[in-house]
Amino acid sequence: MDMIAKWFLELYETTGINLTIVYDAYDRQRFLSGLGMTVYLSVVCILASIVIGAVGAWAQGSPLRVVRGLVNGFVVLFRNTPPLVQIFFFYFGLGQILPRIEDVDGMRVPILTNVQWAIVSLSLFAGAFNVEIFRSGIEAVPRTTTEAAEALGYTRFGVYRHVLLPLALRICLPSLNNNLVNLLKTTTLAYAIAVPETLYVSKQIWTDSQNVPVMMIVLLLVYTALVGILVFIMHRWEKALAIPGYGQGGAR
Amino acid sequence: METTPVTDAPSSAGWTPDQPLVRLVDVRKSFGSLEVLKGVSMDVAKGEAICIIGPSGSGKSTLIRCINALVPIDSGTIRVEGQEVNDPDLDKLALRRKVGMVFQQYNLFPHRTALQNVMMAPVHVLKQDKAEVEARARTLMAKVRLADKENAYPGELSGGQQQRVAIARALAMRPDVMLFDEVTAALDPETVKEVLVTIRELAEEGMTCILVTHEMGFAREVADHIYFTDAGVIVEHGPPATFFTEPRDPRTRGFLSKIL
């Protein structure tokens, strides 16, 4: 470790490329914790947004007009407004209206922390898109396949869970993939409410170390790698779900 | 025939096996302004195999799809073992476990293997024990002569094989009556036979079968009773011996002369 740190210190002294995140223990720790926060936000929001998408798409098929209207309203609201505005709305708007609670030390604190608000906001944002993505998959499943399940006695939920959703998921995975990539990148907006994710800690680091261009390049590389990992996982999932003789799984 | 297990739902009160298993009385159905069924009545006794034939658009498919409530009717009554199908409080599960259905396009679940297709509904819908269902599913796969295809996905099977899996899938629910909706219409001529053989065996074992078909030779051979529909009404019906040789109605004669 010392060897590497020494090498990067020398690199700075000879070339001016100042990677404090490697040779400075404090900056390294800051940067890693920011990276951890980005991964945490991404994983939680991806899972939550998939659940929102699956539940929302099911509710969209409800026989009750009120339920369908609510889902469509939700989709319009979150698809037609900028995600940064949504985050501000939740943190500054809703966060201020909601009553405060007493924590263990007797301090009056908001019900949700900035990290929690970021998760709520980003999950709903991506979830709204996922509802539409799942819907596109559901609509591509032949009506007759659903009918066969109904004829076997499946309830509406049973049809959705055992037939529609598994098939729809396979059809819509490429679009879902796109949206989740977008979601991962959108976690940088949590910066605006001081969530210490990668961009936020990088800004602290470049302010302290005056290495803005270097940190910018680091950021680009980090996000390229993070999205690369996500895409890799999604492709593995796509492969695992491929059905022999059906769609892309045809060539086994 | 398998014996009916004690776990099966009891028949609706008042129905006895000597009454018609399926009874349609003056059934009417319109899609928008198009009246597809204009007062259809029909009785199907337990153990009987009946064939519904007739020109395209005469309401044959709609007719059998009404029997398991896939299509709601406008008026009239349909009773399956005394249970009224058009009752607004209909217990659809109770009805559909009694009525198996096989479709023209097979409609297997493509993400599940053949064996899983057969097992799914008894496990998910009837909550039956998985091991017991699996044993039954294997027996059924052997019955439709596909024991070696248990782990194949529907996309890897031929049309005739898929259709036989679909028959096994419907039988796994241990229905009292089977509906066949033009089940050979999408098949290659050479695979039609393998499906028809399976259906004939079922009928001979005493399964109550209602078939919509264009296979006249098969209808003649298997059916106890033939119904001829045209323009939403039953024009004529009778046992195959008299139906095919001495059709009374000119419409029946016209239809038969075109296809025989």
Image (cartoon, helix red, strand yellow):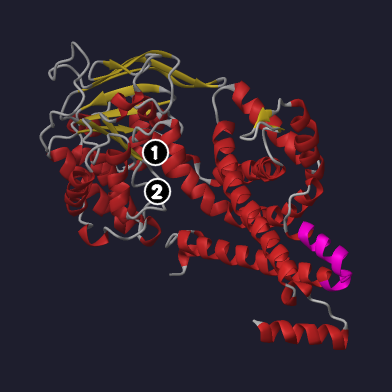
**Circle 2 Cα neighbour tier, 10 Å, few/some/many (<14 / 14–19 / ≥20):** many
Residue A80 seen from this side: no
Q: Position of residue B11 (x, y in %)?
A: 20, 19
- Number of numbered discs overlaid on the protein picture: 2
Q: Which label was assigned to residue A149?
A: 1
Start-end of magenta stretch: A200-214
Give A55 or B145, whichever is nearer the viewer.
Answer: A55
Q: Are marks 2 and 1 in contact (CB under 8 Å)?
A: yes
Q: Where is residue A240 in the image (x, y as percent from the top left)?
A: 46, 62
Give A64 or A182, whichever is nearer the viewer.
Answer: A182
Left or right, A177 with respect to B179, comes to right
Q: Is residue B78 above or below residue B245?
A: above
Which chain is disc 2 placed on? B
Q: Position of residue B230 (x, y in %)?
A: 40, 27
Amino acid marked by disc 2: Phe
What residue is shown with label 2?
Answer: B109
Which chain is disc 1 placed on? A
Q: In this view, does B210 lie above or below A176?
A: above
Assign the C terminus of chain B to one quadrant of the image.
top left
Corner quadrant of residue A7: bottom right
Residue at (81% x, 48% y) in the render: A192
Residue at (73% x, 85% y) in the render: A6
Residue at (27% x, 60% y) in the render: B149
Corner quadrant of residue B176: top left
Give A50 or B85, whichever is nearer the viewer.
Answer: A50
Say yes or no: labels 2 and 1 on the same chain: no
Left or right, A14 with respect to B231, comes to right
Left or right, A39 with respect to A96, comes to left
Secondary structure predominantly adopted by residues drawn in magenta: helix
